Image: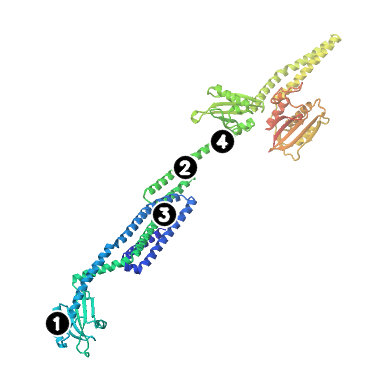
Amino acid sequence: MTYVLVISAALGTILLSLLAAASANTALFAKHYPLLIALNGAVAVALLGLVIYQFAVLVRQRRAKVFGSLLTFRVLVMFAAVAIVPGALVYTVSVQFLTKSIESWFDVRVDKALEGGLNLGRSAIDSLLLDLTNKARAMALELVDMSDGQRLGSLNRLREQSGAEDALLITASGKVLAAASRDLGKLLPPIPSQSLLRQARGSRGYVAIEPDGGKGLMLRAIVAINTLSLADEPRLLQLMQPVPPGLAETAESVQSVYHAYKELSLSRQGLKEIYILTLTLTLLLTLFGALALAFLLSRRLSAPLAVLAEGTQTVARGDFSARVPVTSRDELGILTQSFNSMTGQLDEARRATELSRAQLETAKAYLENILSNLSAGVLVFDSALRLDIANRGAAEILRGDLAELRGQPLSAWPRFGAIASLIAASFRGSGGATWQHQLELAETASVLLLRGSPLPEASGGGFVVVFDDITQLVAAQRATAWGEVARRLAHEIKNPLTPIQLSAEQLQAKLANTISSRDAEILDRAVGTIVAQVTAMKNMVDDFREYARTPAPQLKALDLNALIRDVLALYENPVAALLVRLAPALPMVSGDPTQLRQVIHNLLQNAQDALSGIADPRVEVTTELHDGQVMLKIADNGGGFPDSIMQRAFEPYVTTKPKGTGLGLAIVKKIIDEHHGSIALENHYNQGAAVRISLPLAA
């Protein structure tokens, strides 16, 4: 595009120069002006096409919202205004000036002055020509009566008398008879042609003004000489007299100016059209060239800005590696260098930020990994006691989804009102110090140990609460305490029981024959009561001893279904109907058959005891594989567990039986724990209770 514009501008300048030269030269105009007009018009049309093409490209870019198109349009408008307004003004003034100037050339006074000067010159020359004619006629009268010899001798004299330059006596056929000249070196004066001789034979002769070979003007007069004899050939006399140089030059100058003036006068309208057309083509070439140059300059200005804008958009998308090439050393080049420097700094800052973010995310992921894998629950609150962070351990301990409580204050915790109230009251009453409390949750039958402390203000402030489910720990502590109590009770109580029983039996043996029958009856009844109670106390002491001194299980691979069938064989005449559903192909479990037999027997006996007074008593024994462990379920349709003892059913001395010691489930729980299994109690919604035991598979 740049080369096309340069070539068009150079060609247009050359053609305009030629057109201006042709407009000033009529001869050149007559030969080459149409060609120059056509060439200049073709260049103008080419520039117009170039401008239209560039404008169409700009319109497409503007519709496509290409960056820089609006700037190009504005720069184009400014350049066009700078070019068109002065150009139109100069064109208008030039056309008006040219029209008036051409009209002023053809003023009436100038026309008359030129005609007067031309007539004056003509009159002077005509006067000289008439004088020469008269002299020629006078000489012809004198030569009429002379013979040819006399005429030859008198011709020079008569020439000198008349003052003529040359005199020539010639026949009608062109034969020179005599000649005389002021210039002695001249052989013969100019001989007239036959046409002039024929014209001179008339009555009036021949008179004319002729050029003198570039030296000026020459007056020629040819008159006929009358002859006395008709047989003689007619004679002609020619006189030639030069026009004075000053008069000749003046007359020639006036005549040439007059002819030029008349020529201009005849082509006055054509001159106007020529000059106006030349000015119009000049204006069009200038305007189209200016517009094309405006497109070029506007694109040169907007191109670096467009590249910068593209780089800016790349940076806005997050790519700070963009570098814009520097194509100039002006302000745009400095701006481009500044942009490259800025993107470099942003790239370095982004890398540093990404490194910091990666480190922060690594630390956060590490912290989240720690929090998610903590068995303890962690709750983080802001300064207004709104929940901010809750780990997975907290949700598992509280057995609820804490995500929906994030951002909520403690007062908006309807499901966890007890723990929320404790946390809020503890932070309000601690005065910014660390606190610790133990809380029993009735809804989850668990015991929680909570510790709370405020967070430092430098890290944003807030509060953190760490809690853990210590239900198993409390149960283990209680079991240990009960084991110690049972051991001591068994040791302290069993020793006096045998002497008491023996003493009572000795009293009965010695006093039976010495007292009356009625007293003997009372004695027998009292001794029987003592012996029965001592036996009961011995049984209780044995239970305590068994609870306190349960030996470590001897674990081995065990078929639980076979063990259950062995135990059920002892219940040939059961109190309740037994419904047995044992899973086929049940994998082996790791257990002690003696202790597990005791567990199954204990649970079956408890189930039968719970069915006292039930119209249709049933006991259901089920085994299945669940979550990688073998599950044993023993259920009944009795009255179920009372809510008051559900949370403490596995503690010693907790029982619903009138004569029970409350050690059965405690012993079962201890055996299952030592087998690394789990036990759970549940009440059916319709009727009855169930005990679920899960045992690990054998290795």
Which residue does the numbered mark 3 point to in the structure image?
295
Please say if 592 is above or below 42: above
Choose the circle earlier in sequence order: 4 or 2: 2
Question: Residue 678, how many percent across, how many down?
Answer: 69, 32
Mark 2 residue crowding within 10 angstroms, few (<14) / some (14–19) / many (20+): some
Q: Are marks 3 and 1 in contact (CB under 8 Å)?
A: no
**Secondary-structure class at tag 1:** helix
Please say if 353 is above or below 127: above
Foreground mark, 3 or 1, reads 1
**Secondary-structure class at tag 2:** helix
**Marks 2/1: CA–CA distance:** 123 Å
Choose the circle earlier in sequence order: 3 or 1: 1
**Marks 4/3: CA–CA distance:** 62 Å
Foreground mark, 4 or 1, reads 1
**Marks 2/3: CA–CA distance:** 40 Å
Taking 59 as reference, is 516 left or right?
A: right
Taking 250 as reference, is 102 left or right?
A: right
- Give the farthest residue toward the right: 517
Q: What kind of residue is marked 1?
A: Asn
Which residue does the numbered mark 2 point to in the structure image?
350
**Secondary-structure class at tag 4:** helix
Which residue does the numbered mark 4 point to in the structure image?
368
**Marks 4/1: CA–CA distance:** 147 Å
Please say if 47 is above or below 219: above
Which residue does the numbered mark 1 point to in the structure image?
156
Q: Residue at x 71, y 20 (%)?
A: 490
